[in-house]
Image (cartoon, grey):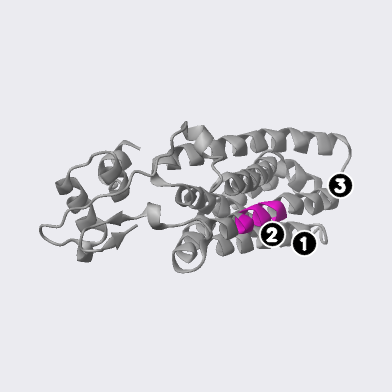
């Protein structure tokens, strides 16, 4: 974190809103978009802060629906992930694997998530980010549902890896989507609250897994029902994207007198 703090460039819009110097803004632009820097150009931005507290701003009429949809996605996504992280070794062991083999499945889930974050991160830069993440969540749901159809250890390993790729990778991208959804002045609050709601889902997932196992649910039943949170996460992200397109983007740009617009 200290390295990132000193090396990553600050948002040019944030600098403009919070009183950064023209030299700081130009220096940042030279790093991320050199072609947009013109000698003698002065950059400014309209302050997009609303006359209320940051938390209340999340429920402004332009963001209220999207906030609730993102919270739904984060809650369901982290519920699913933490249930799997905590109880996957037990589920694998019930499939006939040794404890050592079962413990490796947690690694497959996390490894798939790392690869998924990289691949999906590239895709959301090239295509519609909300649709990419929604499709990934749906593929994760399909992967989980398919695990209910077989007891093959090989397919269980493949399915868990795919689930990690799609669901854990999508969660990383969802953090990016949440930060882009809100105006610059309120991004930190928006992401923090979405993650906070997600953590409630994580706790619910951990306890929910224990309750389902104690109730005697089979692996097939568990994997089937776990597809539901992934589908709800996909729905939340997709609908949030629909709402986001309706919100004006004019207030989310840094403009120069020469009519150059930077986001």
Identify the secondary structure beneath mark 2: helix
| Residue occupied by mark 1 | 146
Location of residue 152 with respect to 109 vertically, above or below: below
For the residues labelled 2 and 1, say whether their Cβ atoms are less than 8 Å apart. yes
Mark pair 2, 1: CA separation: 8 Å
Position of residue 119 relative to residue 10, above or below, is: below
Q: Residues within 10 Å of mark 3 (few under 14, many from 20)?
A: some
Residue 174, can we see it? yes
Is residue 195 inside the magenta stretch?
Answer: no
Residue 21 percent location from the top left of the image: 17, 43
Left/right placement of residue 184 relative to residue 100 reads: left
Position of 234 compared to 259: left or right? right
Image mark for residue 112: none
Q: Which residues are magenta?
A: 231-239
Foreground of the two, 7 or 181: 181
Magenta portion: prevailing SS class: helix
**What residue is shown with label 2?**
159
Which sits earlier in the primary sequence, circle 1 or circle 3? 1
Q: Residue at x 30, y 61 (%)?
A: 261
SS at badge 1: helix
């Amino acid at each position: 974190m200290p390295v990132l703090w000193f090396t990553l460039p600050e948002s040019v819009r944030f600098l403009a809103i919070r009183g950064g110097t023209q030299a700081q803004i130009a220096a940042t632009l030279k790093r991320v978009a050199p072609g947009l820097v013109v000698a003698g150009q002065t950059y400014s931005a309209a302050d997009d802060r609303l006359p209320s507290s940051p938390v209340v701003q999340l429920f402004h009429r332009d963001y209220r629906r999207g906030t609730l949809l993102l919270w739904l996605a984060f809650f369901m996504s982290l519920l699913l992930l933490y249930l799997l992280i905590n109880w996957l070794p037990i589920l694998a062991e019930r499939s006939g694997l040794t404890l050592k083999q079962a413990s490796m499945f947690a690694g497959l889930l996390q490894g798939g998530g790392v690869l998924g974050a990289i691949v999906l991160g590239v895709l959301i830069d090239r295509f519609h980010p909300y649709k990419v993440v929604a499709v990934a969540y749906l593929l994760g749901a399909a992967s989980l549902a398919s695990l209910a159809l077989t007891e093959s250890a090989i397919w269980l390993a493949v399915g868990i890896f795919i689930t990690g790729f799609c669901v854990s990778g999508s969660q990383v991208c969802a953090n990016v989507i949440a930060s882009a959804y809100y105006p610059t002045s309120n991004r930190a609050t928006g992401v923090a609250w979405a993650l906070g709601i997600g953590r409630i889902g994580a706790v619910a997932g951990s306890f929910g897994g224990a309750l389902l196992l104690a109730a005697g649910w089979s692996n097939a039943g568990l994997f089937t029902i776990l597809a539901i949170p992934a589908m709800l996460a996909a729905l939340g992200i997709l609908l949030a994207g629909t709402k986001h397109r309706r919100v004006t983007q004019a207030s989310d740009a840094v403009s120069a007198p020469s009519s150059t617009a930077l986001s």
